[in-house]
Image (cartoon, grey):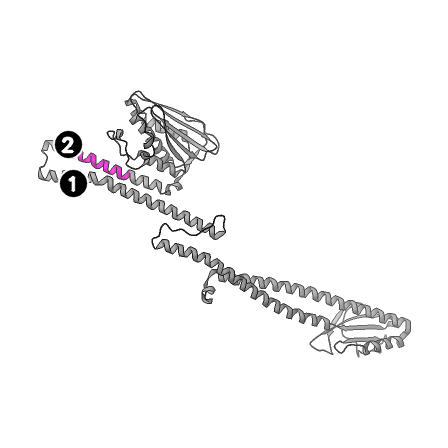
Amino acid sequence: MSLTAMRLSTSARLTLINSALLATGFGSLLLVVTWLTDRFMVGHVQESVRAELRIMEGELAIDGLRGITALIELRLRNLSPGHDRLYRLEDASGRTLAGNLDQWPPTTAAPEQSFSRPSRKFPGRTKVVYQWKPVADGGRLLVGFDDIEIAQVRDRIRRAAFWSLGAVLLISLAAGTLLTRAALRRVEAIRAAAQRILEGELSHRVPARANGDEFDRLGQTLNSMLDRINTLIASVRGATDNIAHDLRSPLTRHRSRLEAALRDPPSPEQLHVWIENNLAELDQVLGTFQALLRIASVESGLLRREFSDCDAAQLARDAVDYLEPLAEEKQQRIELTVAPCPPLHGHRHLLFQLLINLLDNAIKYSAEHALITVTITCDSRGFELEVSDSGPGIPEPERQRVFERLYRLDAARNTPGLGLGLALVKAIVGLHEGSVEILDNGPGTRIRVRIPGATGPLIAPAR
């Protein structure tokens, strides 16, 4: 990977940002350590000055001026060349009695209160920490130690901090680069898979491990999206194929009729019937076209955004009321049984269409004076709808095929219909993530639909 590519990549920028944050945190820690060390060292020097001041005061009290002068000279003779120590004992008039400090440094500090002044021995490098104390007869005693140890410790901490910070930056950049390359390899794998899909390999999928990291979850989401796209493409392709197949025959017939009418026009008495027959077939073609488009729209899943809470009992009552006149023409009876259920979250108009299709089939294929039952129940798993009739039934080998578009049983070919009613039912159930099955009603057919999602307060059944 080139340096330019890394500099332009998001992962490389994140690596640099993390390194900068780490360096900032490490530098802040060093500053705190330096400050605490400095405070400790200053306190140590101040305590040393205070102890020396008490020793000098004691020597003055015991041996007088000669004793403290001898002690100060001893201290100065044994002083290391790299250190600076200052002493001054003066009387009430300010005259120097002992020590190596010519004059009292300017200060407003109280007795035994520390104050500092620049060192005259090492100007610009160190400071001298002073403390003073009054003595007998109005005199004053002053002791000062330089802070050369503090300066040395500061220099060592700075050097250690510089090298440590450099090492931390190098390690963080190296680790960040390795992590960046590892992350970019996963991103590159996803990009390569997307490129292959873009080039036409629609069956190819992004590599993903089960229970993996964020990249694996991203890959699983992308694969699910691709599966959904394939389903939609197959649905559109199937709808197109079905439309082309189902419209080819009636359109061919219409063309033949028009050609025949050109050769041998119908008589004025036959013209009205001829036009009505052709309009009826055209209406059937348009109905088939609209039904196939409706099924494709439902299978796309886009109608889920129109879901809302609805009363399943009221939907069933409306469907029964809508088709009851058709059942009465055949002297059939529809019996509705609905248990108290919570609201059903779904597409109200499609669920109504589902009930209409199932009831219409039951009425259409049941004999006169037959009983048709509609039952709706619910539990913690969801809703269950059953529509039962006493018609000829559906042979078990055909029970899955009747959900295919334009498929009709041999016994039903003389009955008006398009062969799309149960296909739409299956699409609506799939939109609601439910299931549909066909059972034997002995005699007749029982169609059971399950839709998940029975939650919320109960609603009394419609009356």
2 or 1: tag closer to the N-terminus = 1
The boundaries of the magenta stretch are 277-290
Residue 111 shows in this picture:
no
The answer to which of 262 and 142 lies nearer the viewer is 262
**Where's residue 443, x and y in %?**
34, 23
Q: Viewer-nearest of labels 2 and 1?
A: 1
SS for dot 1: helix
Q: Where on the picture, by quarter, is residue 89?
A: bottom right
Amino acid type at image mark 1: Arg
Q: Is residue 222 above or below residue 274?
A: below
Residue at left 10%, top 40%? 262
Report if residue 141 is visible in the image.
Answer: yes
Main secondary structure of the magenta stretch: helix
Q: Is residue 171 magenta?
A: no
Answer whether residue 286 is magenta in the image. yes
Separation of marks 2 and 1 at Cα, in angstroms = 17 Å
Quarter of the picture holding the C terminus: top left
User: Is the residue marked by circle 2 packed among few (<14), some (14-19), or many (20+) residues within 10 Å?
Assistant: few
The x and y percentages for residue 317 are 37, 27
| Residue 34 place in picture, x, y as percent | 67, 66
Residue denoted by label 2? 273
Left or right, 98 with respect to 233, comes to: right
Residue beneath disc 1: 255
Is 329 above or below relative to 257?
above
Residue type at the position of mark 2: Val
- What residue is drawn where x is 10% and y is 31%? 269
Q: Quadrant of residue 72?
A: bottom right
User: Residue at the location (83% across, 72% down)?
Assistant: 141
Q: Position of residue 21 (x, y in %)?
A: 56, 61
Badge 2 element: helix
